[in-house]
Amino acid sequence: IDEKWFDLTQKNNVYYLVPGEPTPYRTVHNKNSIGKVMFLTAVAKPRFAIVDGIKVCTFDGKIGTWAFVTETAAVRRSENRGKGTLELKSLKVNRDVMRDFMCNKVIPAILDKWPDEDAGRTIYIQQDNA
């Protein structure tokens, strides 16, 4: 399991537009005020089997990716959006939030996607110390 920060938008975007298509509107006023969001990713060792002399991937090791965001209604209106419009806000990742993600998202995804040949074996969840 690993956490990684990403920017919500890039500082420089290149758009290829059809003639007459409007340029996409960017709500960030300054490149330094671009919001960041943290993702939690779970991966495992891939599993391979030999079928008819050919090495075949039986489990690719990809468990899932989850964003630490919540949809909240805007408290006040602005010139870009009205009051009550749903917008994404980053969560403050602390012990309770991480435990909630582990119990309600990561472990059910592991149980759902884990290969059947390893059903009786112990699963170890290793986190980095970020």
Image (cartoon, rainbow, N blue to C red):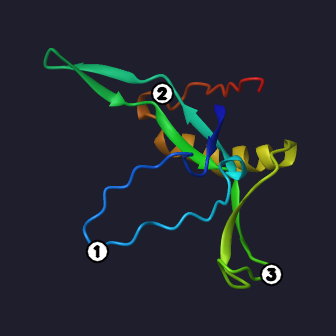
The residue where tag 2 is placed is 118
Three-letter code for the amino acid on which mark 2 is drawn: Asp
Comparing 35 with 86, the one in front is 35
Helix, strand or loop at mark 2: helix
Determine crowd level at label 1: few under 14, some 14-19, many 20+ residues with C-alpha closer than 10 A. Answer: few
**Residue 95 position by quadrant:** top right
The quarter of the image holding the N terminus is top right
Q: Which residue matches tag 1?
A: 20
The residue at the point 73 percent across, 79 percent down is 78
In what element is the residue under mark 3? loop
Q: Earlier in the sequence, mark 1 or mark 2?
A: 1
Q: Is residue 122 left or right of residue 48?
A: right
10 Å crowding of disc 3: few (<14), some (14-19), many (20+): few
Residue designated by label 3 = 76
Q: Earlier in the sequence, mark 1 or mark 3?
A: 1
Marks 1 and 3: CB-CB under 8 Å? no
The percent coordinates of residue 9 (x first, y second) are 56, 51
Q: Are marks 3 and 2 in contact (CB under 8 Å)?
A: no
Amino acid at the residue labelled 3: Arg
Q: In the image, which disc is placed on residue 124?
A: none
| Mark 1 → mark 3, Cα distance in angstroms | 33 Å
Q: Quadrant of the C terminus?
A: top right
